[in-house]
Image (cartoon, rainbow, N blue to C red):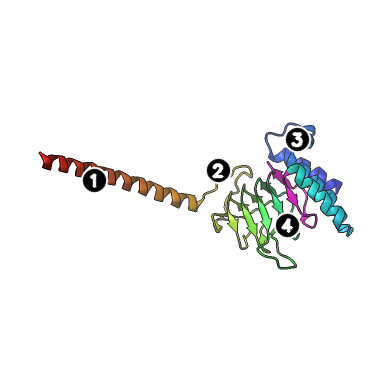
Amino acid sequence: MLDHIKSDIESVKRRDPAARSTLEILLTYSGLHAVLMYRVSHWFYTKKLYTIARCISQIARLITGIEIHPGAKIGKGFFIDHGSGVVIGETTEIGDYCLVYQGVTLGGTGKEKGKRHPTLGNNVMVGAGARVLGPFKVGDNAKIAANAVVLEEVPPNCTAVGVPARIVRRNGKRVNDLDQIHIPDPVAQELCAHLIRIEKLEKQIKRLEIAEIGNRLNGGK
């Protein structure tokens, strides 16, 4: 557990340019606080002290706004950036050096028993507000764009965007983990195209209305 905690701190240092020192990270990073308390609660969970484990996880939720079920399995170097609103379900499995932003849900799609939450491979990035729902795998080095809703498996080295999410990059060059802006979003692009068309139509209607008013005035004379 101590090795994992050390890796968690080092992951924050490596990935967040705003982190200035270990002391600052330990004192001010709510994402790290949630992960540290998860490590403790998970230890009690593995000893079948479920009530103690859940109490610790609920205290962490009250303090940080991040809910990690103590039954989840999380590898080393896990970083929750900005933190607030993250939910990680009981049967979730997360590999090493994964990065999760605020508002992310790693959840299930129903009340079925057994494996019902996603499995994230190593070095997976999940953007702000994304929802990954169901007992499937997100492969190593995969990227989930902000606000995406992922309902099926994402292969390794792929980028998924949209609602529902679709694969837009496969085995391409890796992007910076902290750069969510340059991940292409076809849904947003399509919406932008429709907005441009609506604006053009509104201008045409306006011109026609002006012309109609002019014709009426000329006819009145």
Q: What residue sits right under mark 3 in the picture?
A: 28
Instruction: Identify the magenta region.
Output: 65-84
Query: Mark 2 or 4 closer to N-term?
Result: 4
Identity, as a three-letter code, of the amino acid under mark 4:
Gly
Crowding at dot 3, Cα within 10 Å, few <14 / some 14-19 / many 20+, comes out as few
Identity, as a three-letter code, of the amino acid under mark 2:
Ile
Marks 2 & 3, CB-CB < 8 Å contact: no
Query: Which residue sits at x=60%, y=42%?
Result: 179
Marks 1 & 4, CB-CB < 8 Å contact: no
Identity, as a three-letter code, of the amino acid under mark 3:
Thr
Residue 40 placement (x, y as % from top left) = 85, 49
Crowding at dot 1, Cα within 10 Å, few <14 / some 14-19 / many 20+, comes out as few
User: What secondary structure is the stretch in magenta mostly built from?
Assistant: loop
Identity, as a three-letter code, of the amino acid under mark 1:
Leu
Q: Is residue 50 above or below residue 59?
A: below
Q: What residue sits right under mark 4 in the picture?
A: 89
Gap between marks 2 and 4, in whole Å? 27 Å
Q: Is residue 67 magenta?
A: yes
Q: What residue sits right under mark 1 in the picture?
A: 208
Q: Is residue 178 magenta?
A: no
Residue 209 appears in which quarter of the rendering? top left
Q: What residue sits right under mark 2 in the picture?
A: 181
Residue 32 appears in which quarter of the rendering? top right
